Image: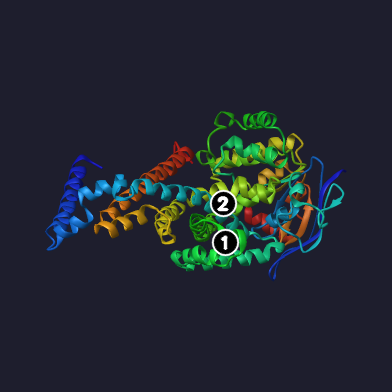
Amino acid sequence: MGRRAAVASTISSAIIVALIVWFFWRAPNGANVRFFFLNPHAFWVNLTGDPSRSLYSILRCFETNVWMFMLCEVLVLIFGLGLAWLRLSRTPILAPLRVASAIYTDVFRGIPIILVLFAVGYGVPGMHAGWISQRTATTYACATLVITYSAYVAEVYRAGMNSVPHGQVMAAKSLGLSDVQTMRRVILPQAVRNVIPPLLNDFISLQKDTALVGTLGILDANQAAQLYGAKEFNFTGYTVAALLFLALTIPMTRYTDHLIAKDRRRRLAGGAA
Amino acid sequence: MNTVISAQNVRKRFGDHEVLRGISVDLAEHEVVCLIGASGSGKSTLLRCLNLLETIDEGDIVFRGQSLTDARIDPNLVRRHISIVFQAFNLFPHLSVLDNVMLGPVRALGRPRDEVKAEAMQLLERIGLAQRALEFPDRLSGGQQQRVAIVRSLAMKPDVLLLDEVTSALDPTLVGEVLDLLTDLARGGTTMLIATHEMNFARNVADRVIFLHDGEIVESGTPQQIFDQPREAATAAFLSRVN
């Protein structure tokens, strides 16, 4: 971008942002909404918490969202891969599992996650089925996230595996690699590179959906904001929670973009072909 | 003669279309055989059947006296001995040139990395690409990629090398370097079955030339006999079209 173009786009962006701010600022009831959603005092109290008034720190509660996301992400990657692998296997003995995996992905991509959360979080303990019914709400919440997101991620993996040209499989087989080695050394590394952007989309969704676990009474950022709202009749807590989520997702997307670009440069540096 | 691999009355169908209609070929140790014929005559299919990338419908494939159609045979073990090089190279784009060459010996054969690496570097030295060992295939020219693909097969020390029109996807200026490598291998005694459209190459390098037409062997003989005195009208017609 030339210098003139850079100046022009900066000015036009500034004007547009100014217009949007002005619109909300001038709205007839704007001052009221600002008081309820952007109250500086409430912002601070929500961030730090105030034990003397039994108010939680949303920042501390957000830790729940973060570790839940990190744990579930790893499990989703593993479980999703297993599902995709079953779906693509051609071994006749695995045919029933292949069908099961197809049904699984269809069903869990089709049910709103909050309904799965209710079914698992209230249904499983309600069964009185011994050990499995005596887990904590956090376990059920994690299980729900893993169950649902594995279905999405399995489809992403499958698309990635299908995007690897058949010649690659033939080349691997002609070197005497077994099916497992072909998958691990040849197909998967290429498949994953091809699907990093959609995989990342699912991760961001997963991260945001950790905000639903409050439904089971788990004290996460969203639940803390809700408690604050109910107690103090002010919604600034939701703004705090939103900003915390953004603070996590935006660096993550930027970092992944950086990794993708680096990998591409490494493979194509010099541009000769 | 010591036969390495032979196809015996092999038939292969894709749906209603019979691509191979009873092909029998023997390949002796150190022998170089060129398969010629129009596109769609069954050359590629025959090569793929020989290393079990395709299953055959009838007939047999015998490798060193053992039938490969036996259900107890593990195709992955067979392919360590019978290696194929493809028209489209099919190098692994996510691995460096060196890792492409090392993958088979290290993973399929389970050989020690150091030993394999030394051999792989020697092979790359031989094709003049040792100093580019750590680069990725996309950075190489087509001719260089195909030579790496050939060396990747050689690293497995196969008993037989099958080559499926390995110069057909190349820019004409790059064909020579690949054919030179194959000529070099032929002189060194590598047993090869080569499907090719390069008639001059076949004439210079082959011990035997086989003409395939519509999934059948029309004629087989020395290069001189096939190219200079074809017995069959179909062979003569094909040769007059390509020359």
Q: Quadrant of the N terminus of chain A?
A: top left
Q: Who's the residue at 70% across and 32% down the image?
A: B112
Residue with the most extreme bottom position: B16
Which residue is more in the foreground, B6 or A114? A114
Q: Position of residue B124 (x, y in %)?
A: 62, 32
Q: Position of residue A109 (x, y in %)?
A: 49, 65
The residue identified by callout 2 is: A78
Which numbered dot is residue B211? none
* Same chain shared by disc 1 and disc 2: yes
Q: Who's the residue at 68% across and 51% down the image?
A: A179
Which residue is more in the foreground, A125 or B31? A125
Q: Position of residue A237 (x, y in %)?
A: 29, 53
The residue identified by callout 1 is: A133
Q: Position of residue A223 (x, y in %)?
A: 36, 56
Give amino acid for label 2. Ile
Colour mode?
Answer: rainbow
Give amino acid for label 1. Ser
Residue with the most extreme front position: A52
